[in-house]
Image: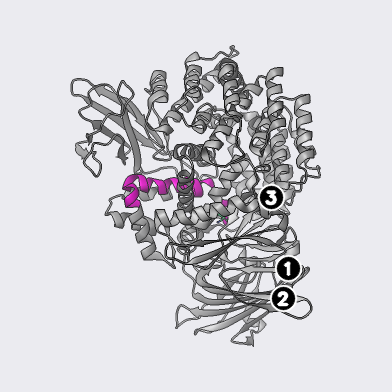
Amino acid sequence: PKEIFLKDYKPTDYAFERVELKFVLDEDRTIVKSIINVVPRSETSNPPLVLDGRDLKLLSVKINGEVVKSNNLSLTSRHLTLSTPPSSPFTLEVDTELHPEKNLSLEGLYKSGGNFCTQCEAEGFRKITFFQDRPDVMAIFTTTIEADKTKYPVLLSNGNLIDHGDLEDGKHFAVWEDPFKKPSYLFALVAGQLESREDTFTTCSGRLVHLRIWTPAQDIPKTAHAMRSLKSAMKWDEDVFGLEYDLDLFNIVAVPDFNMGAMENKSLNIFNSKLVLASPETATDADYSSILGVIGHEYFHNWTGNRVTCRNWFQLSLKEGLTVFRDQEFSSDMGSRPVKRISDVLRLRLSQFAEDAGPMAHPVRPHSYIKMDNFYTVTVYEKGAEVVRMYQTLLGKQGFRKGMDLYFERHDGQAVACEDFFAAMRDANEADMSSFLLWYSQAGTPLLTVTTAYNPDTRCFTLKCRQEIPPTPGQPLKEPMLIPLAVGLLNSKGHDMPLSDVLDGELPLSLTDASGQAVTTAILRVEKAEQEFTFVNIPEKPVASLLRNFSAPVRLLQPDITDDDLLFLLAHDSDEFNRWEAAQIMGRKLMLNLIEQLQQGGKLSVDSAYIEGLRSILCDPLLDKEFVTKAITLPAESELVDLMTVADPDAIHTVRRFLIRAIASSLRKELEYAVEENRSLEPYDPNHSSMARRALKNTALAYLASLDQPEATELALQEYRTATNMTEQFAALVAIAQNPGEARTSALSDFYEQWKHEFLVVNKWLALQAVSDIPNNVENVRQLLDHPAFDIRNPNKVYALIGGFCGSVVNLHAKDGSGYKFLADVVLKLDKLNPQVASRLVTAFSRWRRFDDGRQALAKEQLERIAKVEGLSDNVYEIASKSLV
Ligand code: B3K
Ligand code: ZN
């Protein structure tokens, strides 16, 4: 396998201006004819023109209508090279034959649910035709599709439908033209038996846009929420960023077989069905929220990704980090901002911090890759979004908007790099932020240690900050970076103090807002390895609220913070994120202490202050109920894995279960009340306050059921039976399924019987069983591989069952190695069908060095077993081999 480096990037020698594609779709042989206007960039030389192509059968190559002689061509399994192309503009015609019906990799052209569809990002277009398949080659595409009219009545591609009609032999055709130039990765085609939900949106300048969501006929009723989400997203992008849709048609197609969530192909988004289809009976609140977020995300790509795209794949975060940030902001505005922030930070800390601390750690802009598909990571996406958020934190909302405007003014229609975004932000605000660029090139999560001191005589409050970025593969030493540290100071009544002046070293900084008012949250610029900030005129010793709203993706250490401070912040902080964080810090500390007690053979007991803190949150009627839910939820087991020197999965699990039960029995009355009080009264509605009620009720129910006592189980069963929506029905099932026994077994089989005809619901059922902590659950999961509900060719099912299993820390890391062996078995089987999905699964191994020697040896054995298989895909090879280094 060949490694590709950012430093080797060169523009192409040939530009492609227009591309005309013709697809003759057929059950067992599809023909693709491509006609490209090629323009050499230099008039004086004609270097070879290298086209990418994989799994294609080449039929013919012509230049300016003449067949190219075979001595001027060379064909390998990866490339078609024209050795002496003309040095003036020419027409290149290439005919190829492909077999979508045999394509199980789900990239390129393939069949899903009987229909044809495509997935080209990152490098799937080369499985459709020979092409310079890279994002800096942008062309105008015209696409003709021919197919049997009965089997494939709907024919879609990018842009506008400019012609269509019937042909002989029961066939028909459609011609689509996309007026915007685009890279090949944004090309899309769909053909099949589909129906659409139609709606319209009028843009701010008065353009009428036809919106269509395509699915098989029986699923149309489940597309209402997706359509509402799309319209909200279109409106939001106009309101917040002044960005308007640019064509008269916007199509979304839902397909059951898809490697990831969705794809932003120009005007023809293709989605994994699970991110489009929802009804109250079959989808949970979490599904409704994901649909809103992902529909928004793909729509927002129309500007951040499509109109302005990436120069090369190393710049992926240019579009992904920015678009994730945009979808996070959109969802915040549609629901609760603090709750959304908490969820996003949880995801970042659970997945991205772990990635940053492991063998696959890479910068937001990677320096190299073997398979680009392996770099669609939480680092590029979620950490990338944090980097974008930091611009906004540093420059303010208005400053950020100015930067965005300048970015589009400069780069519309171009393929650009992360520096271009940085430069637009900097120039629009005349800001000085050079050390900020390091966020793109340095991997690893910075450790920010902050200690505080108050001097009553000088009325000064000083923060001492130290930043340190741990070494990561290939990057032993790091430079300090610009970290925005948002700080508030609470007085003894729990109110925010006005912050008028702060000294950064000797430098006085005035902290006032636009209207001259003293602010209550200061954004400190931490740029040096060690730096002191002094707040002056502070009348009493404050409690500091640091890193408000999680103002930077760092691990914050506050060695001198006390439990009393944390309880105080939990009760009073005006920054809701930090109220939640205070409970999390206490929870983490408590669990780590309990783990130590357990490892030393001590008896477990819980500190009542923590439980009292949770009680006061639970009983506070003024708090957002979803916030309460988040605040009473303990840090996850996998978070603790990352915090221990040698992770002990069994101890982590025992302690977390113990603590859940301790909370449940101490707060039993309050939890019962929460269940009682938050039952659904009205028909299902996915608005924030109804979702929040359900979230609190469901969490309370899970706590109660953890006790495994007859009344609690009966309560959960009753909720299960009387539920009128999937959110509550499934949550009750989850609550019951915590404890092995008859209730669990019969509820699970009842659920399956009820829903076996709904594939998306069945996946929830698979995932629930897979993630179970029941000892030796690996055997159940192995059996489920043979269940009729499972199909290894469908990524959603693989993520549900195998991904679900990897979510159980105790069972994946079982002491006897059974979890590792199982995972390796599945990876090797799947790699032959779908390398992209197989390599996602391998990443579950990447934390193997965090465990004891015994587990390390067992995990390593399986990783080695994978890495040495002959014919392994580059995808799996890259992850397995890097994990072993
Ligand atoms: N851009 C696509 C991801 C493509 C992944 C290719 N392996 C979806 C998204 O981020 O919007
Ligand atoms: Zn995206």
Amino acid type, label 1: Tyr
Q: Does the magenta stretch include residue 471?
A: no
Return the disc, 3 or 1, that comes first in the chain's sequence. Answer: 1
- Nearest to N terminus: mark 2 or mark 3: 2
Q: Determine the residue located farthest toward the front in the rendered image.
A: 682
Residue at the image point whose x is 76% and y is 67% from the top? 151
Amino acid beneath label 3: Pro
Is disc 3 placed on a helix, strand or loop?
A: helix
The alpha-carbon separation of the residues under discs 1 and 2 comes to 9 Å
In magenta segment, residue 399: yes
Q: Is residue 90 left or right of residue 517?
A: right
**Magenta stretch, residue numbers:** 371-400
- Residue bearing the label numbered 2: 172
Do we see residue 256 in this rendering? Answer: no
The C terminus, quarter of image: top right
Q: Main secondary structure of the magenta part?
A: helix
Q: Distance between the residues labelled 2 and 3?
A: 32 Å
- Answer with left or right where residue 792 lies relative to residue 408: right
Q: Name the residue beneath numbered marker 1.
A: 152
| Above/below status of 180 relative to 231 | below
Per the image, the residue denoted by label 3 is 795
* Element under disc 1: loop
Nearest to viewer (mark 3 / mark 1): 1
Which is more toward the observer, 626 or 592?
626
x then y, percent, for residue 695: 57, 33
